[in-house]
Every structure is written in C-alpha cells, then in structure tokens.
Image (cartoon, rainbow, N blue to C red):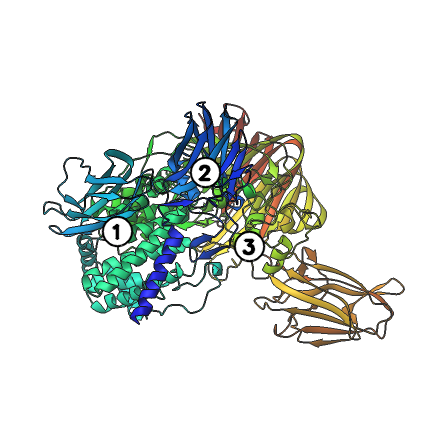
Amino acid sequence: MKNIFVVLILFVASYYQLIAGSGTLFENIGKGDFSDWKGVSVVDKDRVVALTNNSITYRYVDGKRYNKGFRRIDEGVKNYTPYYGIRFWIYLEKDEHTSLQVTLRTANYNKDYLQPEIQANVAINNKGWQQIIIPFKSFGIKNAQRQAFLQAVKEVSIKQTSSNNQQVLIKQVQLTQGEVLAVSTDIKGKSGAKGTTVKYELNVGNTSDKVQSVNLRTNQYGWESMITSIEPAEFELKPAESKNCIVTVKIADRVPAGGREKQNIVIMANGRQLPDASIELITASTLPSPNILHTADRWQVVRDKVMNYDWAKKEKDKYIQLADKWIVPALATELTNDNADKGMQLFQTQEEYNLMASGIAYQLTGDKKYAENIAVFMRRLSDPIMGYSSTFRGCHQSFVQEGHFFQHIAMAYDMVKTANVFSQTDEQNIEYTFRLFIETVQLDMRQGAINNWKLSEMCGALYCALAIQDWHLVEDIFYSPSAIVDHLAHGVMNDGWWYECSVGYNVWCATEFSQVALALAPWGINFKDMQVPIGTTPYYSLMPGAIKGTGKNGINFDKWGPIKKNSICLKDMWDAIPKFADYRGVMFGVNDAQETMVGGEGYDLAYYLFHDPEYAAIVKRGTTRDLLYGVAGLPETNSVLDKQSAYADNMGIVMLRSQKEGRPINEQIQASLHYGTHGGAHGHFDRTGLLSMSRYGRSFFNPEMVWYGYPSYMYKFYVQTSLSKNMVVVDQKMQEATESFQKLFYTGKMMQASLVETKSRWSNPPYGGMMYDWAGNISFAEKTWQEGQSIFVPQKTPEYGQVTGHTEPIQQQRLMVMTDDYIVLADYLKGEQEHTYDCLFQMKGFQGLEATNKKFIKHDTQMNTDPLGSAQFITDCNWWAVNGTSKASFFTCWGKDCDNTGTRVPFSADGDLKIDVFSAWPQQKELMIGTAAEAHPVAKQVHFAIRSGGKTLQEGKTGTWVLGAVEINQAIDNLKELELVTTTSSDKTNTLFWGNARIVLKNGKEILISSLPQKKKNIQTPALEGKDYYGGPIKIAGNVIETALPAMPTSTKDTAITVIDLSGVKAVAFKAILGGDYPLGNEDARRKTYSSRSQGKEANFLTVVEPYEKQSVIKKVEALTSNKVRVELKDGRVQEITIDKLNGSNPKINIVEILNDKVLRTETSN
C-alpha cells in the first residue's frame, strides 16, 4: 500500500508539473538542426541562414485540447511561463547595425481571449558570434495579459528586419529560465508561531555556458525584526548544474500574530549582481483561527445575539437543523450532465451549504460532532488518490460555482481548525489541495478579464491562501494585475454600479468584496475603506473579444457615462442601490434581472461594515435577518431616499417618483427609464425603454418577466431584444447598443421629468441567439429541435449569432413626465430613410380597446414573418386603424387565484393593478394587440406520420411551442383509410392538435375530418369539444383554429394514432396544421404586446399611462399637438403639459392645472 501511495504521489506531482509547467533550465525550441522550422533557406549542421526581411518560424505540433476539471489542457501549445525568456546565437559578417524582431503567436482559436501575437525588437552591431537573450518582459503586451499569453504559445518567428549584412547565421534557439542563473521554490509564503523558524528550500541553477561562483544574501529594507539566514550562501555551479540551499527565517517575539515581513533574496554570480536573479518570500506570524469568516471576537458577538434576540435564535436553529441532517457524502462515482466536458466532479455544489451550516453550528455550540463532519468532508476532498488532485473539479457546476464552493470550504475549515479534528497528514493533504485549487484559479486569471466569475473564483483562492497563511499567494490574488483590487478598480463604475448593470450582480459582487474586507481585516489590511484609483478606460476587460466595443451577438463591452471622481471604494457599490429601492426594499430589474429584494439580510452585511443609517432602513424593510452579520438593535431611523427621484449616469437608469402630499407612500407612482452602459453579455437592447412602472408595490414589467433561461436560443433572439420591451422600435428590429445620455432631470412638486436620448442603428437580432461552446458545433436548426422550439429556418441564413440588416443611425429621444396620477411619455425619432415605428408596451390582461374612430383591419398570425427577426415570436396579432386618442386597458392581479404563470413576479404585493394606455399622438395610427411569447412549458419534440395501408405517405419532426407548426397538404387519391400518427416524450402540458383538419374531395369541396368515422388509439381528448385541453380557444402558431383533431398521446410512452375512414368519400387530399396549442386555456391573463404604429422618416408619439387599483381618475386625453397633451380628470381639473424643444439643446417642460378656467398651479422645468 505504501508503494502504491508513493507511485500515486509521483504521478500527481508529475501531472501537477505538466499543468503548471515547471520546465528545465533551458530547452530547445524545435530541433537543434532546424529541420522542423519553416523559412529555413540553408542549414549547416546546427545553424541556419536568415535573410533580410525573411522569417524563420517554428510552430508547435497540433495536439489534443480537453479539460481536466477546471484546467484547460492544450497539447498543441507550449507553456513559456516557467522560463525567463528566449535566447539564441547570431553571427554577423561585419560590424553593421542589424535589427531583429522575435514574434510569439497564439493559436487562432484563442483569438477572443488572447492577443494573436506579440513582438520584441533587438538591435545589435558587433561582428561575429554573440548570444542574444530576450526576457519575456521585453515583449510588447500588457502586463495583465502577459502570463496568459505565455501559457499558450503556438508559434515562434525570428526575422531580420534591417541590416547591411545580407544574411546572418542563427543557432541554438532556446527557452531559458534565466540570463545567467535561475532561482525558484515551490512555496514562497509560510507562517509560524512567534519565536519559531520557518524554512524555504531554494533551487539555484546555472543557465549559462560558464562556471558561476554564486553568492546569495538578503536585501533588507531596514526595519526587519525577523532574522534570515541562508545555507549554503556560497557555492559553485557548472553549466546546467543546479543546487539547493535553505533559507531560514526566525520569527521574532516582537512580531504580533498576523504580522509579516518580506525576505528579498538577491544573487551575485562571478562577482556581478544579477538584477533578474532574485526571489521574494513572505513570512507571517501565525494568526489564530478562526479568522476568515469571523474572528473569535466576532463569533462571540454572534453568540451574544443568539442569547438576546429571538430572530437570531431562530436563524441559529435553522443552521443547527441543517447541520444535524447532514450526512457527509461519499465522493461522486457518476458524472453529472452539468459541464460534463470538465470530467468527474467530487461533490454536488449544494454540499457547501451543509458544510457552512456545520461550521457555524460548531462555532455557536462547541459541539465537536459538527467539526468531525467537516473533517470527514475535508479528508475526502483532499484524498491523495481520489480527491481534488485527481479531478481538479470539486463541484458539479461551472467554475464560478467552484469559486464559491471553495470559499465555503476554506471558511468551514477555518471555523473548526481549533477543534483538533485534523491530523498532521490531514493538514498536509488539505494544504496541498488548497495550493492546487489556487493554481487552477491562477492559470485562469491572467487574461485581463474582469467579471463576476473571476471574482468568485479569486475569492475562493484568496480564502484558501489565508487558510494556509501563504501571504505570497494572498498578495498575488489580491494585488496582481486583473486580481481582486483590479476588479474593484475596473469593474465598478463612477456611480458605484458593477459594469454588468444588474441589481443581482451588484449586490453579489459587493458582498464578495465585503467578505474579502472582513477576511483581510485581522491581518491589518483595511480593504473596507481602501480608495482605489478608478479605471478610466471605456473597456473593463483586456481580452480582444471584449475590448472592441461592440462584439459578437451585438454585445457592447464598454463602460459609459461620466467619470467625476478619481477613485472608487467598496462603499460606493453599497451606496448605488438604496436610492432606487422602494418602501419595501425592492428594486426594479435592469438587464438580466427581475425585481430584487435588497432589504433584509442583503444589506445586513453592508450595515455591519459601514453603519450607514440608510442601510439600516433598508434592512428593516426586509423580512429576514442575517445571523452572521446582522447588527442587533438597529437605529430607529427611516429612509429619506425611498421617496425621492434619482438617477445613475453610468448604469444609465433614471427613476421618477410622484410627490403628491399626504398620499401614503405605497400609493405613489414609480417609473424608470434605461439609457446607460450595455452590461456586456447580460445587457438588454433597450435604451430609452420604460424599465418599470409600479404602484401599491405591484410592477407590470421587468426585463426578465419573460425568461427562457441562458441556454435557450430565445435568450438573445427574443428576451434581450428591443421587441420584448416598452419602447419605440424601428422596423421591428433590435436597437444597437450605443452610448446614450440623459439631457434633462427635473424634480418638482407637480411633476418629475427626465429626457434620455440615443442615436443608434437598428438590426436583426443575433441570428439563433448565442452559440455556446458547450453545445457543440451544431446548426441553429439542430438547436431549435434540441429545445423542442422549431421555427422556420430558410436555406440561406446569416452565421449563427450574427447581427445583420443594419439601418442608418436613428436619432431617438424619450421624455417621461411623472405627475401625481399618471405618466406622460413623449417620443421622437428621426432617420434618413422611411421607416416603420412601433411604440410598444408589454402588458398582461388585455381588457379592451376604446377609440372614437377605430376600424378593424386584419389578423396576422405573426407580427412579422421575417425568420431573421424577433417579431416572429409575437403571434395572434389583431390590427385596427384609429383616428384620435385610443385607450387600451390592462389588468393584472397578484395573490390567490391570480394567473401569473409564464412570468416572473417575485415581489409584487397581492392585489390588483389596472393600467390604461392612452395613445394620443399621432392622431392617425395603426394599433396592434399581439400575444407575447411567454415562457410556458409547452415545448415538445414531436414526430409525426401520415400513413395508409401500411405505407407512409409523409413523416417528419418538429418542435411545437409558440411556433413550430407544420402545414400539411397531402395527396390521398383513392385511399380508403388514413392514419394520423404523433409521438412525443414531453407530457408537462397537453398541446398537440391537427388543426382545421379536413379532406379535399374530388369535386373541390372540403369536409371536416370530424364528420368522418374515426378510431382512436392512445389519444388524449379535451373535456370540451372545440376547446383546448384547458378549456380555452385553440390557437396554433398564431392561427385561430375553428375545429381540431386532438393529437396528444394519453401516454407519451406510446404512439397516438387516429384512423380516418375514407371509404364513404372520394378524397384527393388531406389538409391540416399540426402543432401545439398556445396559449393554454383562458387567455385573459396572458401578456400582450401592444403597438401604436407610425411610418415615415420621423415619428412623434405622445402616450399617457395611468396605473390605478380601483378607479381611474382620467376622464379624457387629447393631444393638441405632437408636443402638447391635455388631460381632463374626473374631478373637473384639466392639466396641460407642453414640451418645448424636445429634440433641441435646451428642452423645457411646462405643466399647468386648470379648474373652471382658473389656473390653480403651474410649474416649469429648469
């Protein structure tokens, strides 16, 4: 068994070196005779001729690419990071200035993540042979990306760019670990108790071709207390020889727990100081555990809360119950479907909650059984044979979850270290596992990427480094390029919002930073109040795919808006949200977000750190508290921000709140517009869009009201696009994400106002949505089938994810005016060409359309049948021509017996919200009511066939859902019987019908199938004839179905068959629409897309929107001009709102209120 263990350790160690790339002192690039180099003109033994302006190139042989856990392995590239640089010998025939360029290239498949190539230029002059050594730090690349590039070198080229030497000779092109000497050690940071010593083993190697006499010493700053010695400090190295020495650091008694010093070891060779041959170690005085989640003193505060506050005791009981139920899982033996390409996982991700509960339970009770459970988990995680070192994957989800997983692992381990449940072997295995995980993170964090995934991963690595008290790793993960501090500097914008512009991501990232601050505080680092120089570049990430502004899928990666201060800090992130949270602590959604409850435990952590009274006010609005961070005895203060209007220019949101005196806060109206930073992959295409409007704690809309999830093609083909928003759209296309601005912000007593503007092209959405690497190289047609959501795919289509069909830039402005009782939206658009403009609203529960002069025009199955656009997903569209003001009424309710299926409304209060939309301008317009593509579980993979006499006449497959219908027109001359066959594996909902199924007779007449004799096998029959399976009308792909033949199998394990007897008729053809019914059942509560349409080079819209609970206060709305609207209230008051210079440089708004021809009050924006 001992031999097996040793062999395994050697295997793991060798694999570890393979991944990390330990390297040798020097290594040839390609073969020494240049036989595998290209561009070689003449070869003489071990040297090659390089002609002016010709390159000689070595390319590493292509190899397999795969994942080992969360490490990406590419056997077709070379990892150069263990090396110092490139060296070679060059021969000049004469003393003439000669320029050389060395180029390193990466593989093309890394183009979105790495620069394609980097260069270093060298100038030489001397005749004869000379050695050139080019450090990798001399190559032109940003430091934050250098390591990632060097991890994946595909090609090396050397080129003579200018010389009076017609040719030069080159030999021995090599990688080298040093110019003269190389010094390394596996571990550069350790801790020890006061009065003890720690030791580091250094390896020094001679990379030159001469014997080197070596001297090592410490280069002291001046006030060090620790005593450092090196043994041996002098020795001789032959060429290519390496020797070890021991650095011993004695930790002085004066160094307090958590104190640390740096030992800078410098080296001389043959009497010459080598500037690049040095190494820095960091030695710490051991800090007692616990110290990551909480210190011992902070844990005592938590215990005191439990003793004195009922809410804290209840929260403690929840942790205890979870910990008591936990049975520590064995290591996984079956691969999950989540990220299966990463290989075998060790545990399910959710085990982290049990782990944390056990650690917290131990700290609160002192019961060792909880610590023992954690010890069992840690032994399995760090098992040398079956644990992390064999899989490089702890949890079953993505790397972002892996980061969080290891955060909790390190915290739990730290919580129970004092319980004496770990042996010395356990500690060694755990440290080794933590170092492996840290390296996994380091390998992935050098691309210059700034995002929430990396932050989660780095926080996991940081806590692991703190747990093993290696401060060299801590500083690397915290301070190095693109590490945690850079994430704060470049990921957070001037207004405190995280660049992805989502409430959830802002709270999450602020929480991550805050927990880092708490973990570092015991070590004397005040990250809580640290002011970091703010990033001023428009880009946040350095990766080529993200640095170019608008990239793939139409995504824009820039940060927009003004920069008014020179630094950013953690508190800025927490300050960003309170002014937008309503009286309940709920904030409206932006981008990939729905309403979010930021009150309660979400802000307990913020108040714990900063004691800001506004944070306390938000905490008190919530219904839950955080035991770990919740401060007992919150101050009796109320928010002043929850009544005010507000905006954030970088995030690009403006929120207006009505200010009617004496009205309860829940009856005030709140509405917001979007105009700012796109938010990268999570951004929606809705500049000037009405993001939210709420009253009584009920909101009619958020960007995730219709949500298909990230994997679905609908995510970027519909959900994020302009067609699913409340805004004016051009030609039913998607608005380009461009920098937009707020031109006016006004707060008064009668009105609040904001004017936002943009100038953007409009295009088709990314065709087919987003193409994910994990989906494989499948076509869009295959993707629709996989999802059971077929649409028409033409023979010639754009590339997957390509944005096409751009218009010219369109000027667009939206003014929102908030009064006591309603909002006014004034829109202006102008292009160079003729366009169709649709002023859209997405509202549930259509009640009816009123207008003095309206005429029904048509019914369309789709808003637009163009297969490249998003309007194809809006179905069952009715159109009217209207002259004058129209009123469309909508009704939504929340609570018992209210139908909110297919929509996300997590925090709307129970009750009713009625909305009247008055379309006042243009006077002449077309209005549409269509059915939005809500996310209901209707998608099915359906196989069908039409048979007769054992012969198949037609067969196929389709994904039935909102669309996916198949038009059937099958010749059946002289057949006596017809079999209609369907199969599907999905039984979540009953939807399948042969719609309007009929037989065409020889004389040209058509008769319904329902009039002919039938036999059914395994057919689910609706309860009501002529209705769908849920009692509503039958509609297939927007077609209203008058009569239908059910096609849903009773059991999806078997085929559904209907046999039609044709013996009594002379049939020549069978016609039908095979598809899925949508919507299901009663449609009254379904979300509708409402459009007011205008055409021309420019367009004006005036819309009045009134939200109310019981009775409307508006009697009449009339547009006097395109810039003036008159609203007559039922109590006799008349309000006129005039807009001056909507598209000018100095817009103004005036509101006047009149009763019985007498002006009661008036107000003008400044």
Residues at marks 3 and 1 touching, judged by CB atoms closer than 8 Å: no
Q: Position of residue 894 (x, y in %)?
A: 47, 56
Query: What amino acid is found at the position of numbered circle 2 in the picture?
Result: Lys
- For marks 3 and 2, the one nearer the N-term is 2
CA gap, disc 3 and disc 1: 39 Å
Residues at marks 3 and 2 touching, judged by CB atoms closer than 8 Å: no
CA gap, disc 3 and disc 2: 55 Å
Query: What amino acid is found at the position of numbered circle 1 in the picture?
Result: Leu
Which residue has dot 2 on it? 171
Q: For numbered disc 3, what is the local secondary structure?
A: loop
Which residue has dot 3 on it? 712
Is 321 or 921 nearer to us in this picture? 321
Looking at the image, residue 547 lies above or below residue 25: above
Q: Position of residue 1076 (x, y in %)?
A: 65, 62
- For marks 3 and 1, the one nearer the N-term is 1
Quadrant of the drawing holding the N terminus: bottom left
Q: Is residue 497 visible?
A: no
Residues at marks 1 and 2 touching, judged by CB atoms closer than 8 Å: no
Looking at the image, residue 3 lies above or below residue 27: below
Query: What residue is rendered at 66% in x and 54% in y?
Result: 791
CA gap, disc 1 and disc 2: 47 Å
The answer to whether residue 751 is left or right of residue 990 is: left
